[in-house]
DNA sequence: TTCAATTGGTGAAATATTGAGGAAAATAAA
DNA sequence: TTTATTTTCCTCAATATTTCACCAATTGAA
């Protein structure tokens, strides 16, 4: 019942306003000044609903929206300052998503949030994202609540970037993840330049999981993919 | 359980009307002729709910509302004479809970007040009553009724902040708690002011529980988590 | 085979985060 | 008021983490 909501808006006032309104309804609210911050946290710690301002420093709400959609179908409410954005959102025909045009009534937004959750409850009482805090691939387990990873039951001590990267690869273990996507997700927009930070992190991660049946194989000229020894990564 | 309600309205009739209706429900009512009087009293002696007329001598209800919002998120009900004010309330992103347009039904207002309190009770009861007033983690026990903590049966003398922090960590012992959440929940600032007060308190707390099987382990770059020696927090 | 682009390894420099101790400030008690 | 307690702030040191440079190894393509 403790629904967790993430809010990304660079305006402190709006964040706090929504926070106080939604907390009064019993929701648990985390605010983020940028969409990048929210996205990074969402990977390692998903929530039940997201409220995204369109205009933000860094990459805008639309970009974050599409990035999140690659890994989750969490309900998203967009906040937009201009009617033109609203048109754009309508054009996108985003399934379960909604939008509000500023200025908006916080009371109406609260109502919308409640109705979204009510609809989800009706469809399926199990929430896919937030309850799914355990990830597993081969002999590696990740507990997103405690932010800990284990290999064959033994604690893996990972740094924040390593942890996030591994989590992202495990979420997407069914496909190869391009390098730029990792940079986008974990390092954010400022990493436009040619950089090898992702490789560095993969390198360190590999050292820490040498004993595992799982391994991070490189897809040459593209990115990385989680594989097991059965997978015959040779291709 | 004796809820205290402050009412500011320059019209004696309205004040007395509301007073009699609400007192009949068991609430304790204080009336103020102006919002300034109410604000002054509220600072030294906060109440559980506020009813504010918009049009008053001195500073109007909107001003008082924003002032109160700076120091509290007590539920506030606005009374307005004109529909245009209602629009204003909805349009502006002010943190008001609700509003009534004059003339209004006192019975409906009483219903609203009750529902606001009921909602708050529901939220609070999750934390206080439902999960019992006794908390336990490893050899540490907390009795929330007596506000006391023991370690291996011996009394732990904790300061208020230490007690609150430890309690919060014990309630959430199943997960890592981010630093910002501690700051938000215990110190009350949402903004990411660069501050180390949480670390300071954790530091002092750790000294007091060195003998315990439980320890407060840091989740690097994130926050803290209660662990026992079995947990093998790695690191 | 040869070449250019890409990737991996080593290690060290640059950054960031946390912890310790104590001083100052705020708060509560006497 | 003074005194004691608690909280916050400050500085610096200790770690931990991230990034970078350099070069060797690998890969894919001509």
Image: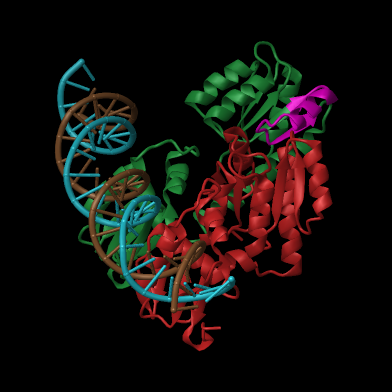
Chain colours: A red, B green, C brown, D cyan
The quarter of the image holding the C terminus of chain B is bottom left
A226 or A224: nearer the viewer: A224
Is B97 covered by the magenta stretch? yes
Residue under the image location 40 percent in, 74 percent down: A150
Residue under the image location 66 percent in, 50 percent down: A63
A18 vs B165, left or right, is: right
Against A231, residue B180 (above or below) is above
Residue under the image location 74 percent in, 17 percent down: B55
**Image location (x, y in percent) of residue A1:** 61, 61
Decide if residue B126 is in sight here: no
Against A139, residue B60 (above or below) is above
**Image location (x, y in percent) of residue B145:** 40, 52
Is B135 covered by the magenta stretch? no
Which of the 4 image quadrants contains residue B175?
bottom left
The quarter of the image holding the N terminus of chain B is top right
B136 vs B71, left or right, is: left
Which of the 4 image quadrants contains residue A209?
bottom left
Against B99, residue B216 (above or below) is below
**Residues in magenta, as a range:** B79-101
B161 vs A79, left or right, is: left
Against A88, residue A226 (above or below) is below
B187 or A176: nearer the viewer: A176
B19 or B116: nearer the viewer: B116
A117 vs B235, left or right, is: right
A100 or C13: nearer the viewer: C13
**Image location (x, y in percent) of residue A41:** 52, 55
């Amino acid at each position: 019942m403790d629904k967790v909501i993430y809010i990304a808006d660079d305006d402190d006032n709006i964040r706090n306003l929504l926070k106080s309104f939604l907390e009064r309804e019993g929701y648990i609210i985390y605010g983020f000044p940028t969409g990048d911050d929210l996205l990074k946290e969402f990977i390692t710690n998903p929530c039940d609903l997201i409220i995204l301002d369109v205009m933000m420093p860094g990459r805008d709400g639309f970009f974050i929206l599409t990035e999140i959609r690659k890994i989750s179908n969490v309900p998203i409410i967009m906040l937009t300052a201009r009617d033109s954005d609203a048109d754009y959102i309508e054009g996108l025909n985003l399934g379960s998503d909604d939008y509000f045009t500023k200025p908006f009534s916080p009371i109406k937004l609260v109502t919308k949030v409640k109705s979204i959750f009510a609809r989800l409850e009706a469809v399926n009482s199990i929430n896919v994202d937030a309850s799914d805090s355990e990830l597993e691939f081969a002999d590696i387990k990740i507990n997103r609540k405690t932010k800990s990873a284990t290999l064959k039951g033994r604690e893996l001590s990972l740094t924040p970037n390593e942890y996030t990267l591994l989590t992202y690869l495990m979420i997407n273990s069914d496909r190869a993840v391009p390098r730029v996507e990792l940079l986008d997700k974990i390092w954010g927009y400022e990493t436009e330049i040619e950089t090898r930070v992702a490789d560095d992190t993969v390198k360190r991660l590999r050292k820490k999981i040498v004993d595992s049946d799982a391994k991070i194989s490189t897809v040459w000229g593209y990115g990385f993919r989680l594989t097991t020894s059965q997978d015959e990564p040779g291709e």
